Amino acid sequence: MGWGRLIFGQTFTDMPDLIATLREEGPDRRDIAVYVQDPHVLLAQAPQEVFLDPSHTYRLDLAAPPAAERTISGFTIRALASDMDAQAVNRIYAARGMVTAPLEFFRAARDPDPLTYLVAEDEASGRIIGTVTGVDHARAFGDAERGASLWCLAVDPQARQPGIGEALVRRLADHMAEEGAAFLDLTVMHDNAQAIALYEKLGFARAPYFTVKRKNPINERLFAGPDPSEGFNPYAQIIINEARRRGILVEATDPATGFFRLTFGARSVRCRESLSDLTSAVAMSICDDKSVTRRVVAEAGVRVPEQLSTSAPMEEIVAFLKRHGRLVVKPARGEQGRGVSVGITSLDAMEAAISEARTISEEVLIEQCVEGEDLRLVVINYRVVAAAIRRPALVVGDGRSTIRALIETQSRRRAAATGGESRIPLDAETERIVRDTGHSFDAVLDAGQELKVRRTANLHTGGTIHDVTDMVHPQLVEAAIKVARAIDIPVVGVDLMVVSPSEPDYAFIEANERPGLANHEPQPTAERFIDLLFPLAIPAGVRQVLEAPTGRAD
């Protein structure tokens, strides 16, 4: 399958042969033995090596009448057709924490070919936003039952259109029925309530079949017992998971607020997500006050937008608005985009924005609004590890739903994709932005019509993240490192407003002392964070890369 082998248990008559086949699993692969007869007997043969996968098997009878079909809008389903499609599929796999497949595997000719790859393509951008794989059992091993199975259903967490997963499943079922398959099987984790609800809606029913896997680092969370990351948000979980992979002891201190302790040998470090003992109180206090941050980085030669405090005389504020036309109002202290208003063009709007910002911080700043894209650079140990464009939340009309309903639907999707961290607030700022476009929350957008409902691109207010690490301009990398060195902070998220990530022009926005390391796939943010905390736990190959004379960790 590219990411590992499907091993059909019903084709084995001897348990030791099946165990021996599982032992042939390649490095960084995940083999799956399906339809294992008497799995309890198989486990007794090698209890230290294999385990019973905690997933359910579901079956769709392809001869039964199909469930009522949902109208899809904004995307099409087609067969995978190019290397670019394959790269996009791997990008989605990586974003979903799945094992990727080599491009050579997608290109390989197979006769007969038991594999079917389908992709969902965004009609507007041409971007691949979903994928599913089907296996024709008759072509794979001459299955007398004429079975088929579904694997690797995955939807891009940044996708906006509803019903992508459902459409992929329906199209694959139709294809397998046309090929003469009698049924379509799939396995799903027992606690994946959202996926199970989808499959049951489409007519799948539980089937009494079991799956066995080999114990390996990829599968560890399925057989290693309670996870110490339980109760933590995704920003702490990604660090805890990487620490466990290195054999570093994890002690949960206060999961609700993201506190934990990591211990390796004689060294112990306390963390709150990506904030650790290595960040000084002085560096934290510099980041905490945005006006102080701006002065410190400006003195280091970093380009900053013009800024004013609301404590300035009113005539000075009026002149500032007249000079720049569009302003940003934000609390001097605060995070996650709370209390920030962008694109203020009038004194009335400014007064309302200042009142909103004062709910977060008594001191409020007024800043020149710089046009462009919001670029976040994650700097760890004074190297840029990841760079991503953050885009504000938007919704896509379907010709039926109100803007309020579209926001609620997109908010639920963003929350599901980010472990509850990203939601679009239905607050005064969202209402102001929608109103500025000439709409109200109760208006209905035409099918396919896009509408930005926030101007800040923060993940916590529904923004999306798009990796651009491989194309970021060296001067932007240099600016981010200047910021980190000026503050003297080992881990920081540097936010710049840029014309393009591949061009040198920028304006510094702010520095975050506790940047989220999740959602930057495929960049190794958690790996580099653990490297910083525990240099002795760095694998030898990685150590050679980090010792290379460059400003960016590859």
Image: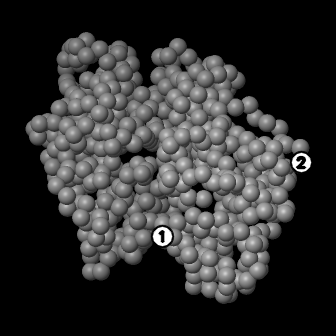
Compared to 482, does 298 lie above or below?
Answer: above
Q: Amino acid at mark 2?
A: Ala
For the N terminus, the image quarter is: bottom right
Query: In screen coordinates, is 133 left or right of 495?
Result: right
Question: Residue 389's quadrant in the figure?
Answer: top left
Q: Secondary structure at mark 2?
A: loop
On screen, residue 41 above or below 500 = below
Residue located beneath label 1 in the image: 27
Q: From the top left corner, tell me how far across and down residue 311 is, in percent.
A: 22, 27
Whether residue 333 is visible, yes or no, is no
Residue at position x 76%, y 35% from top? 70
- Among numbered discs 2 and 1, the one appearing first in the sequence: 1
Residue topped by disc 2 = 64
The label number, if any, that marks residue 526 in the structure image: none
At label 2, counting other C-alpha atoms closer than 10 Å, the crowd grade (few under 14, some 14-19, many 20 or more) is: few
Q: Splitting the image into 4 quarters, where does residue 22 fall?
A: bottom right
* Vertical order, 277 against 84 (above or below): below
- Outermost residue on the right side: it is 64
Q: Mark 2, mark 1: which one is toward the viewer?
A: 1
Q: Position of residue 53 (x, y in %)?
A: 65, 71
